[in-house]
Every structure is written in structure tokens, then in C-alpha cells.
Amino acid sequence: MKIEDGDFVMPGDFLGIIEQFLPDKGTYADKGDIKSNIIGNVSIENKKISIIPKTNKPSVLKIEDKVYAQITDLKGQRALINIDKLIDTDRQLALPYLGAIHISQVKKGYLEKLTDAFRIGDIIEAKIIKITGDNVDLNTFDEDCGVIKAICTRCRGFMKTTPRENELQCENCNKKERREISKNYVY
Ligand SMILES: [Zn+2]
């Protein structure tokens, strides 16, 4: 079967041979054959063949994707998170993904303890740096990454920023706490 521009394909579908096309996004070469890696529509441009993903369908995470996530636990050197949503895209996640941020991946400088950056329940923005099977590792190095919403560990009140870097203060009980704060902090 000859593949044409716009054809609908599934993962593993044969697209052509490497003598015909240059494999590009959404494809892979398998012993000289080019196959689709994803569900989508074929795009052929200047001998480059790629697959345009079906929009608004469940999608998998990729390296460099930025996500909204919630801190679910702090265990040793790792903050465990639930990944809720991809940022800046219509792609929907098929499942909530689990991920982790190692203490060395929170900020570019030294961080003494994870609780100076995150607390359970915080909402963060983070970037995906590694995917190994079901394990997703992230960092919060970028300015727009870090905590975007936090609640007080004492009274569960909403925390607002203070003039000091990476410090929040509870609007209810005035307790001050440290966080790795995103420039997109919501308050
Ligand atoms: Zn409080």
C-alpha cells in the first residue's frame, strides 16, 4: 500500500523505506523501513515524512514538556508528584502520571533541604527531563518553574509572596515559609 499525505496511521504502520523518505517527527526507522510511532496523519514535505498527532486525544509525555503538577510526598532526596496537565497545549494526558524531582534538580544552586522548596499539596510548574518506562523525572530550573500555589502547613491558609526571594507568608496566620517559587506564582 502506498502512503500518501494526510493518510491516517497507527503506531507500527509501514510508511515507506528509507530510500524514499527521511524519517522525521513521529516516525522511526526499522531495518530500512520507516514506521509510525504514534496515532496521527501523515505529512510528506520535501521527502521528509512525519506524523502529525491527532489533537485532543490522549497523549504521552515528552522530554522538555512543561506540566502542572502537585507535590504528593517528600521522600528523602525526592519530591514525588502527580502530573495533572500539560502546559500550553491542547493535548490531554491519558492518565495522571507520577513523577519525581530530585533535590539536585530543584534549583541551579545548592538546596539544603527539600522542605525549603516544596511542601505536600503545593501546585508547581516543572519541566520533564527524563522518562524511563513509567518513571518521569522533572526539574524546576527555569524561571517559570517552581511553586505557583501553596497553602500554609500550619493552618492550610493561602500563602502570598513577600518582598524576600523564595519566601511566602500565610494570609491567615502570618506564618512564613520557604519555597522555590515560580515567576508565575498566582498571588
Ligand atoms: Zn497559616
Image: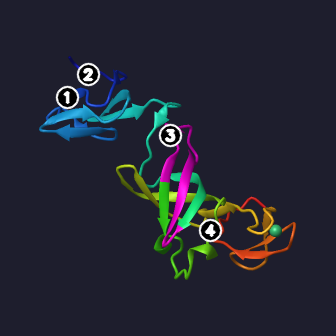
> Ligand 1 is located in which of the four quadrants?
bottom right
Query: Is residue 138 rendered to the left or right of residue 68?
Result: left
Dot 4 amino acid type: Phe
Q: Earlier in the sequence, mark 1 or mark 3?
A: 1
Residue sitting at 56 percent across and 79 percent down? 113
Please give the range of residues in magenta.
75-98
Task: Look at discs 4 and 1 and give the one toward the viewer.
Answer: 4
Q: Amino acid at mark 3?
A: Leu
Instruction: Name the residue carrying label 4.
Output: 118
Q: Residues within 10 Å of mark 1 (few under 14, many from 20)?
A: many
Q: Quadrant of the N terminus?
A: top left
Q: Which residue is mark 3?
A: 95
* Spatial separation of the CA atoms under disc 4 and disc 2: 50 Å
Front residue (pair 18, 113): 113
Contact between labelled residues 3 and 1, with CB atoms less than 8 Å apart:
no
Task: Give how far across and how far down residue 28 sits, in percent.
Answer: 25, 40
Q: Which residue lies most toward the top here?
A: 1
Name the secondary structure under disc 4: loop
| Pair 1/3: label in front | 3
Q: CA distance from mark 1 to mark 3?
A: 32 Å
For the residues bearing labels 4 and 2, Cβ distance under 8 angstroms = no
Q: Secondary structure at mark 3?
A: loop
